[in-house]
Amino acid sequence: MQSDQINELMSALNRAQLAMVPAKKDSVNPFFHSKYADLSTVWDALYPFRAEGIVLTQSPQESPDGYIVLDTQMTH
């Protein structure tokens, strides 16, 4: 489902993407000896979306045949 007009959403999405920086991989997984971006770092990296009023929600949905379906909604 999509709104008839999404020009404001697309403008906000463009501004947010231009302001984004990658989440820093500053945590270490001792089991795999690898670095990763922890949840707080990812949250900080997504600040431009929150600043533009963009909200994403995801919820699992029932699906036949054992598939996983994820319903994603973007709101502005």
Image: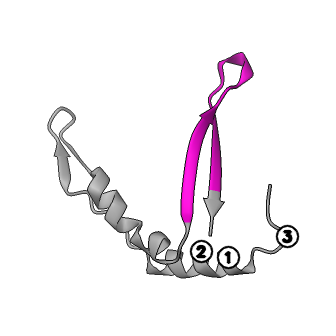
Q: Nearer the viewer, mark 2 or mark 3?
A: 3
Which residue, given by chain and number where applicable, does mark 3 sit on? 4
**Which badge, 1 or 3, is on the more N-terminal residue?**
3
On residue 13, the disc is 2
Label 1 and label 3: CA atoms lie apart by 13 Å
Foreground residue among 23 and 32: 23
Element under disc 1? helix
Asked whether the beta carbons under mark 2 and mark 1 sit within 8 Å of each other, the answer is yes
Residue at 57% in and 46% down: 58
Element under disc 2? helix
Residue 65 seen in render: yes
Label 2 and label 1: CA atoms lie apart by 5 Å
Q: Position of residue 66 (x, y in %)?
A: 65, 18
Residue at 52% in and 75% down: 17
Which residue, given by chain and number where applicable, does mark 1 sit on? 10
Looking at the image, the residue that sits furthest to the right is: 4
Residue at 46% in and 70% down: 50
Q: Please give the range of residues in magenta.
A: 55-73
Quarter of the N terminus within the rendering: bottom right
Q: What's the residue type where badge 1 is placed? A: Met
| 54 relative to 64 in the view: left or right | left
Q: Position of residue 72 (x, y in %)?
A: 63, 49
